[in-house]
Structure formats: C-alpha cells, structure tokens
C-alpha cells in the first residue's frame, strides 16, 4: 500500500467512524415528511397551524429527543416521572426508534428560527 | 295610587338592574386573564435560573439542555404550563413551579417569553 492509498483509506475510516455517532439529518428530514409533522407544526417547523403547538425549528436537539421519549413513556401508560400524556404526539412518538428520534431531533434543531436562551 | 305607581316602577327597575349586578361580575370572573408583559418581569425569577442560562442541562431521565422558551408561541407555553399543573405532563421541577402559578401568572409569563426576541 503506497502512501496515497493509505491516506485515502485512513480518511474513509474517519468518515465511517464519525458517521456511526452523528445523527443523520437527511434521515431526520425523511421522518418529518413521512409522519407529516408539517400538518401541525408547519413545513418550516416554526409556523404551526395552531399557536398552541410549539415551534420546533432551532430548538435544542437533546431537548426535542427528551420530549419525544417523554411522549413514548406517556403512551406506554405508566405514570412515571417525566412523561407526557398526549394522544396525538403519543401516537406519533411510539412509531419512532431511538435512532429515528436522534435523527429527527437533529434535523429540527438545524432549522432556523427565533428561539433563543434569553432572560 | 301615586305611591303604588312609584313602587311598581321601582320594582321594574330592580328587576332589570339586579340581574346585571349578579351576572356582570360572574362574566368578568369567567373571562380569560389578559396578558401583562410588564407584570411578568416580577415573576420570571423562577424561570431564569434554568431557562436563562446558556448551556444549562436537566438530567432526568435523559441529560438534555432545557428548552429554549424565548420566542416560543405564547399559547404553547400556556398549554405546557397548564399540562404540568393538571399532571398530563410530569417533570419534578416544572410540576412544582407550574403548580405555584395562577392563571394570570401563566398568561403573563407566556406573553413575556413569546415576545422576548
């Protein structure tokens, strides 16, 4: 193996390794479209059809993931700390795997909005 | 006869006015509270210790950044706080805080954060 091909292999391995942990934005977008999240939250995930529904675009990805897991816990029926009982979101959340949750949360977080941490 | 007429008139007047006195305040009490952003400034001390600190994380059962609420829809903030109060959402910290808020506090805080841009 010459030096050049070694470099190519090393570089490829780096991408594979990082890809194993990074959320997949394209897959996240596909979930947003497949579950038709836009029908309530808006195509841009910030212009919701009813102001009682939250802006998701630009929210912390780990918070969105936490919220989806809380809806899963709520849908499972057990009254445990940190769960959310919501017939609509519960029905969607139970369709998602952990990977799906990571991906769709990362996708939503990457979208622009005015959400911010301010006092 | 004149006295009787005056009495009659007074009774009519009472019949018209009295229900207003009863229904009026009842309607005012049923009306949803009107948001007062200025009043919220005295109520945000419970919020800023978590939601006002960049990078602040909660840790149960997942570790995550507490949500960004500045710029969020006011009606959603109200809905979330009311769900914590009712128990359809549970979160140890938020349950306690939401439980301490009045309806007026909730609309004030929701308007404050929705407009914090």
Image (spheres, rainbow, N blue to C red):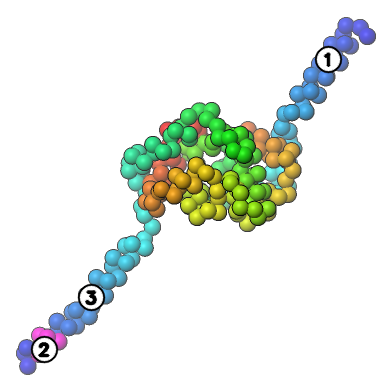
Q: Position of residue B28 (x, y in %)?
A: 32, 62
- Report, in whole angstroms, how far the alpha carbon at label 3 lies from the one at label 2: 20 Å
Q: Residue furthest top?
A: A3
Q: Secondary structure at mark 3?
A: helix
Q: Report if residue B6 lies within the magenta region.
A: yes
| Chain of the residue on which disc 3 is drawn | B
In this rendering, position of residue B95 left or right of residue B39: right
Tell me what residue is drawn at x 50 percent, y 28 percent.
B54
Circles 1 and 2, Cβ within 8 Å, touching? The answer is: no
How far is disc 1 from disc 2 in space, using C-alphas? 107 Å
Mark 1 sits on what residue?
A10
Residue stretch in magenta: B4-8
Tell me residue B94's x, y (percent): 49, 44
- Please give the name of the residue rendered at 6% of the width and 90% of the height, measured from the top-left corner: B2
Give me the disc on residue B5: 2
The crowd level at tag 3 (other Cα within 10 Å; few <14, some 14-19, many 20+) is few
């Amino acid at each position: 193996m010459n030096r050049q091909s070694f470099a190519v292999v090393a570089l490829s391995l780096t991408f594979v390794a990082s890809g194993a942990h990074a959320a997949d934005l394209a897959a996240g977008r596909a979930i947003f479209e497949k579950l038709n999240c836009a029908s309530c939250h808006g195509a841009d995930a910030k212009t919701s059809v009813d102001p009682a529904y939250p802006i998701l675009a630009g929210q912390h990805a780990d918070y969105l993931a936490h919220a989806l897991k809380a809806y899963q816990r709520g849908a499972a029926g057990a009254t445990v700390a940190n769960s959310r009982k919501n017939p609509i979101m519960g029905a969607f959340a139970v369709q998602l795997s952990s990977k799906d949750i990571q991906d769709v949360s990362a996708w939503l977080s990457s979208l622009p909005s005015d959400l911010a941490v301010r006092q | 006869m004149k006295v009787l007429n005056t009495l009659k008139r007074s009774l009519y007047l009472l019949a018209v006015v009295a229900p207003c006195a009863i229904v009026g305040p009842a309607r005012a009490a049923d009306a949803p509270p009107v948001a007062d952003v200025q009043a919220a400034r005295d109520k945000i001390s419970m919020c800023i210790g978590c939601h006002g600190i960049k990078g602040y994380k909660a840790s149960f059962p997942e570790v995550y950044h507490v949500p960004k609420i500045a710029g969020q829809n006011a009606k959603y903030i109200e809905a979330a706080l009311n769900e914590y109060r009712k128990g359809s959402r549970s979160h140890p910290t938020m349950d306690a805080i939401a439980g301490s808020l009045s309806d007026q506090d909730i609309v004030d805080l929701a308007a404050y954060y929705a407009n914090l841009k």
